[in-house]
Image: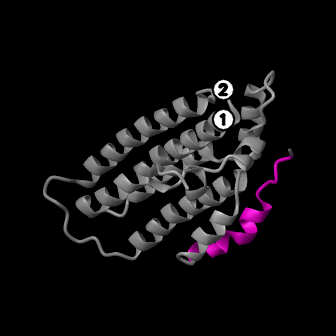
Amino acid sequence: MEDPGWSNIAKNAAWGLVPGLALRRAQRTRGIEALRAVFVGFVFAVLLFGVVLAFLPLKRADPGWSATGALAAVGIVGVACLCAVVVLHRKPLDHDSVGSLAQSYRKTFFLKIAFSESVALVAFVLSFLAASHLVYPLGLAFTLVGFGIVAPGRRDVRRRREQLRGTDLDLLVALRDVPPPARGGWPRRNEA
């Protein structure tokens, strides 16, 4: 199977700004395209946090936080989270079956997203505690570096496919054919 690329994602990215509609559109897609749509949504979210924060007046700092302390805390969290992302990124996928391959890729994808985005979220909160607009851009920088590693691009798919050489499994086919688990881990109606 050939990688469909990012063209459909870029074409539909604006729909991500319409609450509810983006979720319905994403549910209609499967495979790598759905993961790419989710990825674009996370990137937009952290950028929009920065836009909102830029227009908020930050007047009162919490007595326990200074801008320097908040920047140091974001730096420490950022380095730790990027290390976790790199470790997860290098971890080989479980390829015992088509289902385990798809679930393994999705699981590591969302774990890497969580570690990457958590730096921006910590920086967002510390911006308010330290009453400093300088804190969030540092957290955003760490997050965007993490997202650069996480991105389910052609290079990542090609690298993962190389890891599967010698097996009869294809990552793109597995992601397309094996649906993600239902919300909350409960089986879907037709799976029960």
Label 2 is placed on what type of residue?
Answer: Asp
Q: Residues within 10 Å of mark 2 (few under 14, many from 20)?
A: few
Colour logic: one colour
Q: Which residues are magenta?
A: 2-17
- Separation of marks 1 and 2 at Cα, in angstroms: 7 Å
Of residues 118 and 69, the one drawn nearer to the viewer in this rendering: 118
> Mark 1 and 2 residues: CB-CB less than 8 Å, in contact?
yes
The secondary element bearing badge 1 is classed as helix
Q: Image quadrant for the N terminus? A: top right
Coordinates of residue 119 in the picture (x, y in percent)? 41, 49
Q: Residue at x 44, y 57 (%)?
A: 137
Coordinates of residue 114 in the picture (x, y in percent)? 46, 47
Q: Residue at x 60, y 28 (%)?
A: 90
The secondary element bearing badge 2 is classed as loop
**Which residue in the rendered view is the most extreme toward the top?**
166
Judged left or right of residue 26, residue 187 is left
Asked if 188 appears above or below 157 in the picture, the reply is below
Magenta stretch, overall SS: helix
Does any portion of residue 138 appear in the rendered image?
no
Q: Of label 1 and label 2, which has the lower sequence position?
A: 2
Question: Is residue 13 magenta-colored?
Answer: yes
Q: Residue at x 72, y 63 (%)?
A: 9
Badge 1 is on which residue? 101
Question: Is residue 104 magenta-colored?
Answer: no
Asked if 151 appears above or below 11 in the picture, the reply is above
Q: Which mark is residue 96?
A: 2
Please tell me in which quadrant of the rendered image residue 39 appears. bottom right
Label 1 is placed on what type of residue?
Answer: Leu
